[in-house]
Amino acid sequence: MKSYFADTSFHISGKAWQVRVLLSMWKKNIGPGTPVKDLIAINVRKK
């Protein structure tokens, strides 16, 4: 399972159930109402 963040997008590779688990973990960490663009911005800043 791998995830890559660029300045304007993110890519997740893995099996479908792995992608669902990863997205649900992100959703728990940042809140269910957070837009995808904010998720990208948060992870790009961490680099």
Image (cartoon, rainbow, N blue to C red):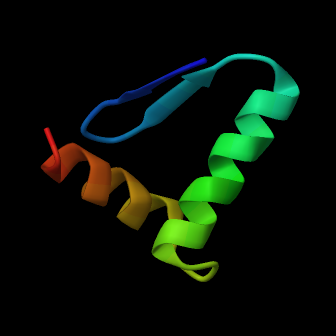
Q: Quadrant of residue 21?
A: top right
- At 55% from the left edge and 79% from the top edge, which residue is drawn? 31
- The vertical placement of 13 against 37, above or below, is above
- Residue at image point 47% right, 72% down: 30
Q: In the displayed orientation, state which residue is furthest to the right.
A: 17
**Residue nearer the viewer, 21 or 32:** 21
Q: Which quarter of the rendering shows the C terminus?
A: top left
Tag count: 0
Q: Residue at x 64, y 43 (%)?
A: 22
Q: Is residue 15 above or below residue 17?
A: above
Is residue 1 left or right of 36 when viewed as pictured?
A: right
Determine which quarter of the picture holds residue 32: bottom right
Q: Is residue 20 left or right of residue 2?
A: right
- Apparent side of residue 42 relative to residue 36 in the rendered image (left or right): left
Q: Is residue 1 left or right of residue 43?
A: right
Residue in view at x 58 percent, y 26 percent? 12
Q: Give percent across and percent down for residue 16.
A: 85, 27
In the picture, which quadrant includes the N terminus? top right
Above or below: residue 18 compared with residue 15: below
* Residue 10 location (% of width, % of height): 45, 34
